[in-house]
Amino acid sequence: MSLESFWKRAGKSQKSSTCSSPSSRNPPIEEDVVTPIDDADIESPNDDADVVSPNNDAPINGNGVGKVVASGHPKFRKDDLVTGLLIWAQYAVVENVNLLRKLDSMEFPLSYHLGILGVSGLTAYAGFFKVGKPKKGERIFVSTASGSVGNLVGQYAKLFGCYVVGCAGSTQKVAMLKEKLGFDDAFNYKEESDLKLALQRHFPKGIDIYFDNVGGEMLEAAIENMNPFGRVVVCGVMSQYTDPTKRRAGPNMIT
């Protein structure tokens, strides 16, 4: 995504200036890296979200991909492709180079480094394979299966040889999971009056791995349907982020 220039102070990790490009300002100080932002992955929180609100006087932070236009650090050179925590701006000056990772020049879109090769892809891969420790033929349930992490978990599981069912919040998303992403089955949780019975219907032989992105009632329903020695990968608790009155993640099951 192409981003309009807005240079403002952004704290210690990124700093900015009122200039439109590095050429019109003083050279970067030692160990600074200047990079234009080519792609960005930002999810702006709503007013009720349990996250830190952005500072009105600072640009928005987010994972991005850019090319180095000037560097005072030996690890990075001009024209290096990098990814890391950047800002919504045409240019960013990064003081903490630990926030950046150098990319190899490959024949695919830079945006891939923010998706399957970025945070979403690594979260899905590590959660499923390192935490879930799947075995071929096992039965996998993925909540929020149409999301950036969930859809990859389902595809990894299918490629690995597992049976996969996902849930989503619309008929269009359910169709996408089954018709485009290769899930064995999927259902719209909003159309289910009893989540435990819904999972019993889709998993008559029980669930071996539950990849949880929701928490709350869905987590409780999945736990009720888990097989002995099943694994629950807790990646997110979306149902609890915005409504404190619904904060329930199996309180009678967790000690």
Image: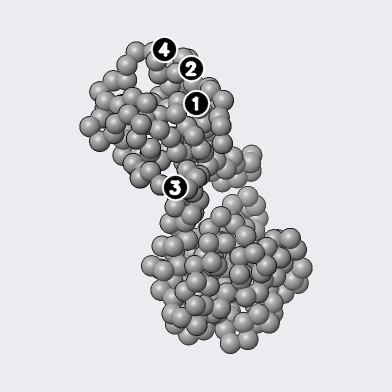
x 41%, y 62%: residue: 126
| Closer mark to the observer between disc 4 and disc 3 | 3
Q: Nearer the viewer, mark 3 or mark 1?
A: 3
Residue drawn where x is 32% and y is 29% of the image: 78
Q: Secondary structure at mark 3?
A: loop
Foreground residue, 87 or 27? 27
**Pointer 4 with pointer 1, Cβ within 8 A:** no
Q: Are marks 2 and 4 in contact (CB under 8 Å)?
A: yes
Residue identified by numbered label 1: 90
Q: Dot 2 corresponds to which residue?
A: 20
Q: Element type at marker 2?
A: loop
Number of residues whose C-alpha sits closer than 10 Å to that of mark 1, classed few (under 14), some (14–19) or many (20 or more): some
Please tell me in which quadrant of the rendered image residue 130 appears: bottom left
Give the number of callouts.
4
Q: Earlier in the sequence, mark 4 or mark 1?
A: 4
* Residue 247 rendering spot, x and y as whole percentages: 60, 58
